[in-house]
Amino acid sequence: MEESIPMENEENNLHVGPVQSSTGTSQPSGSAKRSKTSSVWNYFRLDTDDNGEEKAHCVKCSKSYVHTGTSGTSNLKRHLSICSDERRVVHIDEKIARKKFSRVIIRHNLPFLCVEYEDLRDYLSYLNPDYKCYTRNTAAADVIKTWEKEKQKLKVEFEKIPSRVCLTTDCWSALSGDGYLVLTAHYVDSKWVLNSKILSFCDILPPHTGDALASRIHECLKEWGIERKVFTLTVDNATANDSMQEILKDRLNLDKNLVCEGDYFHVRCCAHILNLIVQDGLDVISDAFAKIRDTVKYIKASTSRRIALADCVNIAGEVVLSLDVQNRWNSTYVMLEKALKYQRALNRFKVVDKNYRHCPSSEEWKRANIIFEILKPFYSITTLMSGRSYSTSNLYFAHIWKIQCVLEVNRGHEDTVIRMMISRMREKFDKYWEEYSVLLAMGAVFDPRMKLKLLKKCYDELDPFTSQEKIDHLESKLNEIFEEYKKKYHLTPVVRTSFNSRVSGQGRESYGVLDDLFELDDMQDVMDEGKSLLDVYLDEPKLDMRSRRFGALTYMAMDVLSVPITMVASESSFSIGAHVINKYRTRLLPSNVQALLSTRSWLYGYVIDDEDDNDQGEMVTIRAATPTSMEQQI
């Protein structure tokens, strides 16, 4: 007879059902409750599969091991050592990792919140479980630290540079409505490299009076320790800027910090002046573009019209038409350029599409072509002035001279509309350039291809009666500035040579305007002497490689050639600012804005965005239906 086993009552049954572990997973009945104290659990996670079996998953390679409440960790440790060797996971320095990621935020305009993105944190933890996540506030603090560190480096560089600093400044309203002032420094460093650095991108409260602007800029200069090194300030023609530069010049002159008491301190933005000149001319002839503008609008309004125009072209490639923005003259130039290219195609399209009534007449096409040729030198110099990494002051004179020549040639044009346009443009030109800016004409003098002799021929070409007077005035100003530099810099004795300043065509840049100017050079005089080009070359003295040969004149040339003739650098910083302060980040602190923009310009320079091209007008692009020979281009 079997012995009956007494049943345990419910109160005495201590192990009925699974027991929850400290990690939140179930343990089988009969096992003791144990906490996971081993460091191996930093690299494994416990999970229960569909069959109710508990497994430990490696966070590095996702391999799993069966695990029970009584299982040890020896097998997990063995796997961890092998897994670590295979994946080469090394210990990371938290400070270095954060510093590097702050540069990622700066360069790619990432929000500080990105360090809290859940998937990004999971990805970084997968790469290395030692990685410690941090908050957005820490990310912002890291950016500030990076800015402060790079700022100290730049301050040290300013202390070492032998040259003076040229400045550009402008104001900007962000999407949030806040006003910002940018101050940019342009200088040649100790390695003879032209640099452009943002000194300040700070908020400024209204009203933006001349006194408020001058005070803010003066504070910035003292903060950087360069108030004694300022050479020029380039600004646009705003009334507040005229007042600001006068106040700032007076303050800097209190300690005699400016060259020649600031006679050359104020430089007007040439691009802004050119825009005023062209806009005055286009206001007179705005009706001349009406049909071309209506043509572009008509064609882009229908896909069938675009295809029909493409069929009329009969070339391989694309038909590209551009619609201008009427307050931006360069977009009008682009519109003319593209429309003139397809002049005959549009005449054919008029026959194909009976509803097309905007085709210009032959006389209107001729007028558009003349206007296009008049605007071409303006467009060329504007493009040239957009340079930030090279000097443009030496090229200024040649292009302005070319523009004045174009205006002189067309002042008596037979077309009344063209003649009215030139009259308005000359009126504005004479207001600003009746005499070329002396300081920027000096840039041409320091170009060894030009010097005073070629400038004299330029003046003779325009007005031979006043050319010598202008040259004498320019030469006296050169001597005046040179005396200032001799007081500061040691003057190395000049080695007297019979250096021939003639320039051959071999060293010319590929600028059509410069080619026109060099045609005035005296190469014909050399040929008249019976010398061949080989004789001219052999008669030239050898190149003197002594960088200190000209002493103080060297530093004077460095400063004059680094004068920015436009405010391109400031406008470029505003383009970056528009990406930083966008509609999703309108509440950034001004200190964070300055740290992001300034550090980005110091580390990575200025970025030209492709989106800026869209400002010139909407593009209409259609591929031709029947590609044929390029000889059949219309």
Image: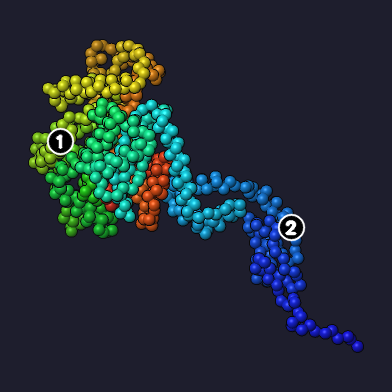
What type is the residue that disc 1 sits on?
A: Lys
Residue 198, given in percent of the width and then of the height, sits at: 37, 40
Task: Give the SS element for disc 2.
Answer: helix
Q: Could you tell me residue 546's position as x and y percent?
A: 40, 17
Disc assigned to residue 431: 1
Residue drawn at 50 percent across, 58 percent down: 117
Q: Residue, x 28% and y 58% (percent of image)?
A: 303
Q: Quadrant of residue 460?
A: top left
How many residues crowd around disc 1 within 10 Å: few (fewer than 14), some, or many (20 or more)? few
Q: Would residue 159 be found to the left or right of residue 371 on screen?
A: right
Q: Which residue is mark 2?
A: 75
Residue 162 point in image, percent of width and height: 38, 26
Q: Which callout, 2 or 1, points at the residue further toward the start of the chain?
A: 2
Q: Is residue 123 left or right of residue 433?
A: right
Near-viewer residue (26 or 321): 26
The answer to which image quadrant residue 481 occupies is: top left
Using the rendered image of the protein, determine whether residue 479 is visible from the camera's viewpoint. yes
Could you tell me which residue is drawn at 68 percent across and 68 percent down? 21
